Image: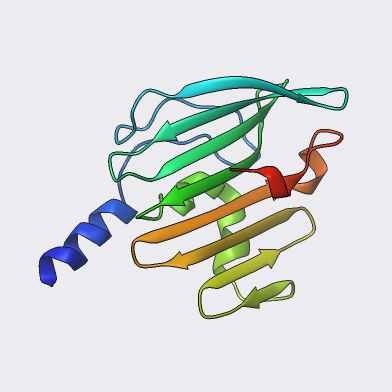
């Protein structure tokens, strides 16, 4: 049991640098396989989806606009990625209690003036997504995020 707890803690705090939500893209984290990028468009706006597979088995997608800024992220897998790195300054929205917060047994949904963060799951099966309303390309549907 102690080894399971240690493995979970190690997976949650894997070092490496992510492109933070609302920031320019960055280099590949040490605990991820080579990224796969796919160019997409919605309405008149173009964006790129960069998908990364962590060694833990968790998949992370970064949605990058034409200026190189991450406007949304999503994750799915057996372990949470390092949300502090992934969400950047918007992690505080998730970490601090306040308005715009809903939570249930397996879901947490928070929002502030611009950021929306939804995280859900249970041990071994986590998923979530976060986006900045002000940066979403025209016609982008957050419900379609992987």
User: In which quadrant of the rendered view does residue 64 lie?
Assistant: top right
Q: Is residue 52 above or below residue 114?
A: above
Position of the N terminus by quadrant: bottom left
Task: Give the residue at x 28% y 52%.
Answer: 11
Residue 18 location in percent, x, y? 46, 36
Relative placement, left or right, of 38 versus 112 is left
Residue at 57% across, 35% down: 62
The colour style of the image is rainbow
Q: Is residue 18 left or right of residue 113?
A: left
User: What is the number of callouts on the image?
Assistant: 0
Measuring 68% from the left and 74% from the top, which residue is drawn there? 101
Taking the view exactly as shown, the residue that stands out farthest to the bottom is 105
Measured along the vertical axis of the image, is residue 55 above or below residue 49? Answer: below
The percent coordinates of residue 2 (x first, y second) are 12, 70
Q: Quadrant of residue 71?
A: top right
Figure check: 95 above or below 76: below
Q: Position of residue 131 (x, y in %)?
A: 68, 47
Q: Quadrant of the C terminus?
A: top right
- Residue 34: x percent and y percent? 37, 23
Instruction: Please name the residue shown 46% across and 50% down the image.
Output: 76
């Amino acid at each position: 049991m102690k080894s399971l707890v240690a493995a979970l803690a190690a997976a949650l705090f894997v070092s490496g640098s992510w492109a933070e939500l609302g920031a320019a893209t960055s280099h590949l984290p040490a605990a991820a396989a080579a990224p796969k990028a796919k160019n997409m468009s919605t309405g008149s706006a173009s964006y790129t989806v960069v998908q990364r597979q962590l060694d833990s088995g968790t998949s992370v997608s970064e949605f990058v606009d034409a200026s190189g800024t991450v406007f949304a992220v999503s994750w799915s897998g057996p372990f949470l990625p390092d949300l502090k790195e992934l969400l950047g300054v918007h992690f505080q929205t998730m970490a601090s209690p306040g308005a715009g917060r809903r939570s249930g047994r397996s879901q947490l949904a928070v929002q502030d003036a611009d950021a929306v963060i939804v995280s859900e799951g249970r041990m071994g099966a986590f998923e979530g997504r976060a986006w900045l309303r002000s940066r979403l390309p025209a016609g982008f549907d957050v419900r379609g995020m992987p």
